Image (cartoon, coloured by chain):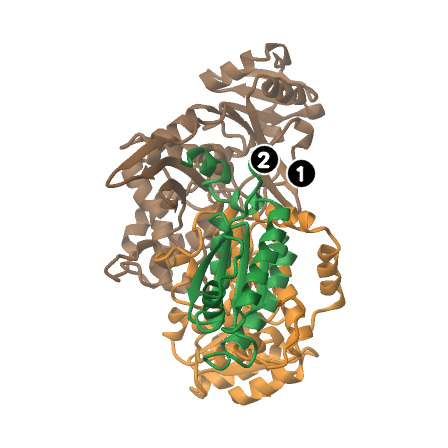
Amino acid sequence: MAEFEPKVIAFVCNWCTYTGADLTGTSRIKHASNVRIIRLPCTGRIDFMLLMKAFAKGADGIIVSGCHPNDCHYTSGNFHARRRWIVYRSLLNFMGVDIRRIIFSWVSAAEGAKWAEVVNTAVNEFRALGPYDEYKNLAPIRANWRTEHAG
Amino acid sequence: MQDKIRQKARELLSSGAVKVVIGYGEGTGSRVRALFIQRPEDADRLIMDERCVQNLAVYLTKHEVRAIGKPAIVAKMPVIRSINHLAYEEQFNEGDIAVIGISDSDELVDLPDLTSVREYAAKNPLLLTAEERAELDKLETMTREERWNYWLEELSNCIKCYACRASCPMCYCPRCTVEVNQPQWISVPAHEIGNVEWHIMRAMHLAGRCVNCGECTRACPVKIPLRLLNQRIIADIAVNFGQSEDYALAAFNPNDKEDFIR
Amino acid sequence: MIDKKLLQKGSLDELVKKLKSGGTRVFAPVEKGGKVLFDEVDSAAAMARDYVQTTLSAKDVILPRCEEMMRFTTGQGTVTMEKAPDLPPPAVVLGVRPCDARSIAVVNAVYLKDYNDALYKSKIDNTTIVGISCAKCDEYCFCTSVNGSPGDTEGSDILLTEVDGGNYLAEIVTEKGKALAAMAPELFTAAGSEDKAKHLADVKVQFDLKAVEKKLPGVFDGEVWITQSLRCIGCGTCSYVCPACTCFDIQDETDGNRGVRLRCWDSCGFGQFTLHTSGHNPREVQSQRWRQRIMHKFSYQPDQLQVTGCVGCGRCSRACPVDMNILQHIKDIEAQ
């Protein structure tokens, strides 16, 4: 059997991290191809339920990234988001959700190299953690049923 | 105390200042229940003792109760806090309600307007008791897997009756997220993922708004210790963002500290 | 003719073990964390003792809170449906109170009368109910007011009554009951002259059911519903703990091109229960929903299905967060 490759969903803001990820590409920096990027207007728009949905639908790891503090296109979206993340992460941990599988970062539009670094590190960590079946098996369409029907 | 409440209720109803007084009265067996007193002569049915713990603020946003007219509400500390949050969220305006405040030392508190409610709430900060903290710590000392199994076990009993939501003064949305189906954010059935998603979502939507009245836990027919989730958040908010009666997640500080963002 | 046998104190455990070894799943009331719930057990020792009523009824076994109806896969303009996975082996539900056993008649009337619900039928056909008479009751119990009794055999395939010395008088009521007893004939010995009535709780009749049924249509437009329901917070607890509530909702859950159709409990207490797509809601306020609950159980169902939709278990009153006491409310209506 081939080595496990984690499915990773990245929720990023339009103005900094998405543009930064674009720069990663135009700078021809290679990074792990496990990441599916979902672009949202602002980290303030990255609802915690999006993260829950990602896990339920089969993500093994999640990256959440946006503008550095003070750089938000909407002035304060990332400050609000940061407060939410602090509370959310602690709540998930309290409930026994594996928070090592959610990685938060600030990546600016100029940090193409940092984005590659964040992705590579995250993917390596998720790979070491293995599939997150513990969570997705809670759904009625379970991970094993998913595989049975694959292809 | 009971006499003072009855007296106050009688005054408010006779003068026409309010149309209904929401308070506690004898229920069946040894239970107490919410009463909606509309005539001064019925004020003597109001009671106040250690059984009177339901958070009556839940009725302030109920349209059947609002339809009666201006209410006065018998309000101990958690109710006062709920009123403060509901006012902040513009669920009523100045003059829409009257408050018969009762202090923790069992004295009538004069709370003539919403500003005084806010000041009173701020003077009595929302703190977890030593026992509540100890209970949180007990779970924190478990391994992650143990905590996960603990909650899966507890939540496996959830039947999605939504008593937690219905009994909560802060859950007044006419359409809850669980009822939004385009897209379907939360699984509706009471299966494993549906229950886990529901309770994570409820705790998050109450983050910074929960007043720790414990009503969700009391209302739960299968005794899930839901308050622990809210108390975890209350503790985190106090540590990270400071003690305040304001809605912590509607605010921010550019210097908020964390240790996990890369 | 009901066959009466004696089951020795220790024989119950042997019966459970025998059933288990034959592949039958055994559900029984188990106490955990201050509540008593039906759960799969390996021995009779795991059964809760000393309780009046289980927190939830045994309904969860025959009409689960969430069950898979079918699976489907969508393709380009096609939908392929497949059967839900095969049902688990037959089950015995042990320790069902007589009121709960009587509720099966109500569920049957809804699911098997006009329309034969295959999913439900396959479950109930494969389930044997071993009831247990009540030696105790509390102020919420009123089975005798709705034609039941603490030792009623209706709905049970076998009814056990704890008699002197902790032995059980076993009344074998149905063919299913006979079949169960035949699996361990050595455990069911000849009964003596046990006086069953002496071991039953004394539940007083609190209202005249016929009079209430007759009265209800006339108070449809009355104020009583508003007065009673003002403190109702509109949760679904009463319906979900009720053994005789049968309403359900159907949810499709998908993942990519695959999906499952699930049936799950629903409650008339919810504001959205009757909400139309147009935005119109025929039951706009809680008093109308509360009226529906009472009318359905005490007027519509007796009328249309010839069963009373309430068995007097008292669970809704015990569980209600705001003390909506059904017995008190029915008595108030009767007194009107």
Which dot marks residue C39?
2
Residue type, numbered disc 2: Asp
Left or right placement of residue A78 versus residue B231 in this view: left
Q: Quadrant of residue C213?
A: top left
For image coordinates 47% across by 42% down, the residue present is: C312
Please report, as a chain letter, where disc 2 is located: C
Q: Colour of chain B?
A: orange
For image coordinates 65% across by 66% down, the residue present is: B260
Q: Quadrant of residue C282?
A: bottom left
Q: Residue furthest front?
A: A28
For image coordinates 58% across by 62% down, the residue present is: A118
Q: Is residue B22 above or below residue C232?
A: below
Which dot marks residue C50?
1
Q: Colour of chain A?
A: green
Q: Is residue B132 above or below residue C247?
A: below
What is the spatial separation of the Cα atoms under label 2 and label 1, in whole angstroms?
17 Å
Q: Quadrant of residue C254?
A: top left
Q: Secondary structure at mark 2?
A: strand
Crowding near the residue tagged with mark 2, few <14, some 14–19, many ≥20 C-alpha atoms within 10 Å:
some
Q: Position of residue C323 (x, y in %)?
A: 52, 58
Crowding near the residue tagged with mark 1, few <14, some 14–19, many ≥20 C-alpha atoms within 10 Å:
few
Which dot marks residue C294?
none
Residue type, numbered disc 1: Asp
The C terminus of chain C is located in which quarter? bottom left
Q: Nearer the viewer, mark 2 or mark 1?
A: 2
Q: Position of residue B11 (x, y in %)?
A: 50, 86
Q: Position of residue A112 (x, y in %)?
A: 52, 68
Shown in brown, the chain is C
